Amino acid sequence: MTLRPRAVATGAVLLALIASAPAQALPPTSRTIEDATQPGKAYDITSVILRSAPSTTRPAVVLVRHGRKVQVGDVVDVWFDLDGDRTPDLHVNGHAFSEFTVHRTSSFTKDGRDISGKDCARLAMAGHISKVRLFSACVGSPVSFAVAVKASRDGSPERKDDWTPAREQFTKKVLAAPLS
């Protein structure tokens, strides 16, 4: 008779562990990627901060910190992986003090459909920061996202481009928005 209470207790513990497992498997709500200072880069990235949206109606944010203030000719590209397959799904490209574009994509080198008019993402460059806002409901409400960031300067050679975390590689994921 002592086996039955133990089996019930063991089953209850296992059930509790299984019920809590999905919550433990979720990515964090923020992540900071530090990037070494590289004065030889055209527009040096010093860190990238990813933050999930505080609510389903607010945007997720990617903050890119640079080693100097933005200047005319600086360019920022941010690719988003929205489905976890480690290939780009969205590309935000912007030039300092100018317009930005947002494209659906499946590549780091070729953009697909332009969705700039849908207001799915916004880019602002000021001071030492480039800020991208992602409105996840506009792009299919992904559970999480990861980014690859490139900072460059018009007319500079490709070797002067600064990538974070590395050339054509994505960061680890963060939640896109709170789960309902």
Image (tube, grey):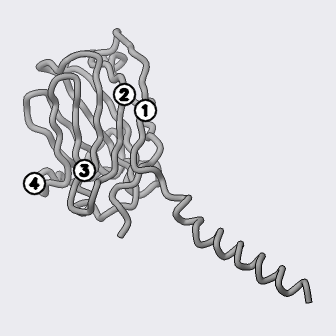
Question: Which mark is nearer the camera, 4 or 1?
Answer: 1
Contact, CB < 8 Å: mark 1 with mark 2? yes
Contact, CB < 8 Å: mark 1 with mark 3? no
Question: Which mark is nearer the camera, 2 or 4?
Answer: 2
Real-space CA distance between mark 2 and mark 3, rounded to the nearest whole angstrom: 18 Å
Location of the N terminus by quadrant is bottom right
According to the picture, the residue beneath numbered tag 1 turns out to be: 33
Real-space CA distance between mark 1 and mark 3, rounded to the nearest whole angstrom: 18 Å
- Kindly identify the amino acid type of the residue bearing the numbered disc 1: Ile
According to the picture, the residue beneath numbered tag 2 turns out to be: 47
According to the picture, the residue beneath numbered tag 3 turns out to be: 134
Name the residue: 35% across, 33% down. Answer: 48
First in sequence, mark 4 or 3: give its number.
Answer: 4
Q: Nearer the viewer, residue 121 or 56?
A: 56
Contact, CB < 8 Å: mark 2 with mark 4? no
Crowd rating for badge 4 (residues with CA inside 10 Å; few <14, some 14–19, many 20+): few
Horizontal side of 59 relative to 18 (left or right) equals: left
Name the residue: 31% across, 64% down. Answer: 141
- Kindly identify the amino acid type of the residue bearing the numbered disc 4: Gly
Place of residue 174 in the rendered image (x, y in percent of width and height, measured from the top left): 42, 49
Secondary structure of the residue carrying numbered label 1: strand
Q: Nearer the viewer, residue 2 or 167?
A: 2
Name the residue: 36% across, 22% down. Answer: 46
Horizontal side of 130 relative to 175 (left or right) equals: left
Question: Which mark is nearer the camera, 4 or 3?
Answer: 3
According to the picture, the residue beneath numbered tag 4 turns out to be: 117
First in sequence, mark 1 or 2: give its number.
Answer: 1
First in sequence, mark 4 or 1: give its number.
Answer: 1
- Kindly identify the amino acid type of the residue bearing the numbered disc 3: Leu
Horizontal side of 112 relative to 107 (left or right) equals: left
First in sequence, mark 1 or 3: give its number.
Answer: 1
